Image (cartoon, rainbow, N blue to C red):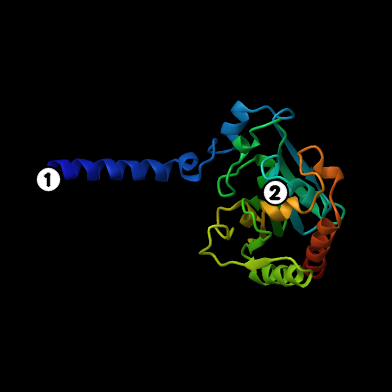
Amino acid sequence: MKKRCIISLITAVCIAVLWQCPIMASGDKYANFAELAENEVEGEDYRIEYTDMGTDLLVLSPHGGGIEGGVSELVRAFGEEYSTYLFEGIKPSNNWDLHITSSHFDEPTALEKISDHSYVLAIHGYSDTEKHTIVGGTDTEGGQAIVDALSEQGFSAELVDQSHRLSGTDPDNLNNLCKTGKSIQLEISTSQREAFFSRFGLVTRAKSYNKVFSKYVDAIKEVLNERYK
């Protein structure tokens, strides 16, 4: 009985520690931006980029550059029409060390600019060998419109509800800190992102995007222009 009580106590302590420690719970190296900034060098390891186009919609990713490959190029593709924000990993390797999950990402420029905008489109990548896009966020009507637009162009896409681990509906999620709390989140598989470029390297992607990339972006732009312009 005593042994069983000790095991139960240890289990309870472990659960409590995991609950209070976001870095362990999320698998990220850094629990928040302050911790990241203490250990990484801006301009050498990471880069922050913001462009203000005076729009209600902000297109962003906290996982650009080498963190989730192909995401930066997608965000910048909207830059001539919408405000954009990027946090990019620019290290020669190990950029995943710079990944902070969206509900813990608190880089000051991001928080400030998101709060200045009414809506957010967040672009992320996830690991999968199938070409697919998971669409989430709190703006389910907008999300469904993007699913429909992508599907019409031959892309595999689905709208997920808040029970899905990649739904992006957590109130603390970076996406949902805008004025209205209305967001659309795109989680794009590795295989789909690779299909956008003839060369998928960190340096080569920007100059090697192809017709598939343009077709994908144009489908999304059509929805955004109808809803947010």
Would residue 26 be found to the left or right of residue 228 on screen?
A: left
Looking at the rendered image, the disc whose residue lies closer to the viewer, 2 or 1, is: 1
In the picture, the disc for residue 140 is none
For disc 2, the marked residue is: 61
Looking at the image, which residue is at 81% across and 56% down?
Answer: 213
So how many labels did they put on this image? 2
Give the vertical position of 87 relative to 74 (above or below): above
Q: Depth check: 195 or 93 in front?
A: 195
Would residue 99 be found to the left or right of residue 200 on screen?
A: left
Image x and y of residue 211, in percent: 86, 57
Q: Quadrant of residue 151?
A: bottom right
Q: Depth check: 46 or 54 in front?
A: 46
Give the vertical position of 197 relative to 88 (above or below): below
For disc 1, the marked residue is: 1
- Amino acid type indicated by mark 2: Ser
Quadrant in which the C terminus is drawn: bottom right
- Amino acid type indicated by mark 1: Met
